[in-house]
Amino acid sequence: MKQQNIGYRLGFRTRQFVRWLSVQEIRLQQRGVPYWITKLPLYLCIAAAVGLLLAGALFAALCLALMIFMAWYLNTAANGRSEGPKGDEPSDGYNATGPEGPGFYYSGRRIDD
């Protein structure tokens, strides 16, 4: 029974490609081309496949790291852990006891009057 699923078709195409490649290697060797040169296309195909697998794994790892960072950032923002001013404190001043008494000062002047 002949199978027509994707895995079978991929294996069949791979087998056809390897068979075609071996025929071409034999033809090149018959013309006097050195053996190691006839193997270069096969080695290049293997290197390309491994490179694509590594690039895909790196891309997946970076996407996962980005999703984890976004989840952490949103969790931190939702819990209100910001380090900004709270209450009625001005964002650009400071609380001190100055020449005009305790209060909020900005550039040496009291601003909470």
Image (cartoon, helix red, strand yellow):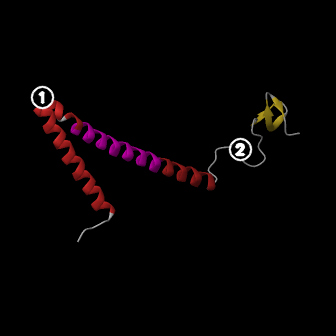
65, 99: nearer the viewer: 65
Q: CA gap, disc 2 to disc 1? A: 75 Å
The residue carrying pointer 2 sits among few (fewer than 14), some (14 to 19) or many (20 or more) residues within 10 Å by Cα, namely: few
Percent position of residue 96, x then y: 75, 36
Percent position of residue 69, x then y: 51, 48
State left or right for residue 43 relative to residue 65: left
The residue carrying mark 1 is 34
Name the amino acid type tagged 2.
Pro
Query: In the image, which residues are magenta?
Result: 42-65
Q: Residue at x 75, y 49 (%)?
A: 87
The residue carrying mark 2 is 85
Q: Nearer the viewer, mark 2 or mark 1?
A: 1
Q: Residue at x 18, y 39 (%)?
A: 24
Classify 81 as above or below 41.
below
User: Which element carries disc 2, helix, strand or loop?
Assistant: loop
- If you read the primary sequence from the N terminus, does the residue marked by circle 2 or circle 1 appear first? 1
